[in-house]
Image (cartoon, grey):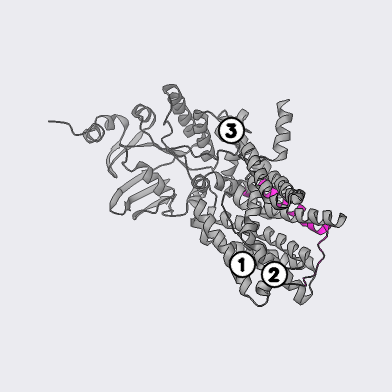
Amino acid sequence: MLLEIKELTKDFGGLRAVENFSLNIKKNDLIGLIGPNGAGKTTIFNLLTGVYEPTSGYVKLLGEEITAEKPYKITAAGIARTFQNIRLFKDMSVLQNVLVSKHFNVEYGMFGGIFKSKLYQKEEIRIKREAEVLLDRFGLQDKMHLPANSLPYGEQRRLEIVRALATNPALLLLDEPAAGMNPQETAELMELIRGIRKDFKIAILLIEHDMKFVMGLCERLVVLDYGKIIAKGKPEEIRNNKRVIEAYLGEVEE
Amino acid sequence: MEQYIIQVVIFMGINIILAVSLNLINGITGQFSLGHAGFMAVGAYASAILAKNYNLPILLTILIGAILAGMVGVLIGFPVLRLKGDYLAIVTLGFGEIIRVILLNMKITGGAKGLPGIPGGVTLLVSYFFALITVIVILNIMNSTDGRAFMAIREDEIAAEAMGVNITLYKVLAFAIGAFFAGIAGGLYAHFYQFLKPDSFNMYKTVDVLLMVVLGGMGSVTGSILAAIILTIIPELLRGFAEYRMIVYSLTLIILMIARPDGIFGKKEITDIISFKKRGR
């Protein structure tokens, strides 16, 4: 078991944003988390990555409890994420954006950097090479030295994924990766995500609104409404599930 | 005349240290601090008292003063962790003023009467030795993984933490390093003027340094150095205008900021501009 989420609950004052959310994620799973606006999907991402502390329940990564750990520690433990609204380091170069993700496993300390020690030289070469390999793989190598905010929208989304992958995660969380994309870009993104899963051998949990996108991509879906899981299963099971249709389209008149 | 020019140039070196170190906190890490005069004061008084009362060599006392200032930086860094932007500015300004008021009321500092008879010895060489060290250290930090961590915090705190940066540690580190070098500038200042009074470290001193950082470009070390040079020279050149001096000074600043709203260098370094031109051709 890669990730074990057990009865996760989060209250904001009197509002229960997430209630008894349980989910097991295995190595190399590709799971979609769907649900209407305000269903609590992003809250779950924030609970998994340590941005919020759950009211109750726990999260275990490879058997180790990571509930309410600091976000940077969870990243180092193996969960990386992207954001619903792009959060790149805008004025830093594309390469620097990826290098930030290497920060936590760089072996030289601050004095190594100040005195440009041998280890500093060696490590900088290592992380730059690793970053370049990734940028190459995702077709961003020619834009390496440009500021991140000069990239077109689709490439900014792609860079966010590259930056998350650069932390060497076991689980990648994608928060609405297809938001704002045209059908052509969405189709490319589907291929990209399939490729990531195959080449990097990691598990992916993604939030998405685009039904065609999730149905075509994920093998398992979890549907959330008002903070509760209302359905779990294969895309074809979810498609015909009465409660899911109700949640999306409103109550069916008898 | 020659003596006067040397003095201005030494003072310029001190200002370079102040601007570059404040830039680390405000420009590179993006934590808008107004406590720099306070850090400078800690370094200045500590070094002055140690040299005067215990006859220690000034190179050593300046270093001890800087370490003390760095520790005060850590002390201030922690409570302000949860604050951002305007709120951070106000609180750090308050801390700076508290330091000044404490110095004003201590016996060992001479209070409002000031502290005379501080050993001298800050030559051109001493001043620029420290300025060079400051610039090299901060430039090297910027080109390391720690520098990228500082910049990532400036760009987007939430994303920085999600990519594995310990933002608490790095915010405190920015304050510690910035305060350390402000302490060095303070020590140089003390042994250069050989007289200290708490009023020299009021909020106007911080604003002077802040102007250099903003004018040079928040985040650009080259910009901070250039702006420190310009803003040390302009007031001296304007001495001929007598009572109109501050008006002309302010107008110069306004015109410069209208012409270059992101500061002279923006976030770039001189090396970026040169290498960009090379690549262009």
Establish whether labels 3 and 2 are both on one chain.
Answer: no
Residue A151 horizontal/vertical position (percent) = 55, 30
Q: From mark 3 to mark 2, how far is it between C-alphas?
A: 50 Å
Q: Which residues are magenta?
A: B117-146
Magenta includes B142? yes
Question: What SS does tag 2 mark?
Answer: helix
Q: Quadrant of residue A237?
A: top left
Kindly report which numbered mark, 3 or 1, lies closer to the viewer in this rendering.
Answer: 1
What amino acid is labelled 3 in the image?
Answer: Leu
Checking the image for residue A135, the label placed there is 3
Residue at far front of view:
B243
The chain letter for the residue carrying disc 3 is A
Question: What SS does tag 3 mark?
Answer: helix
Asked whether residue A238 appears in the rendered view, the answer is yes
Q: Quadrant of residue B98?
A: bottom right
N-terminal-most mark, 1 or 2:
2
Neighbour class for label 1 at 10 Å: few (<14), some, many (≥20)? many
Residue B163 horizontal/vertical position (percent) = 52, 45
The chain letter for the residue carrying disc 2 is B
Residue at 52% across / 59% down in the picture?
Answer: B91
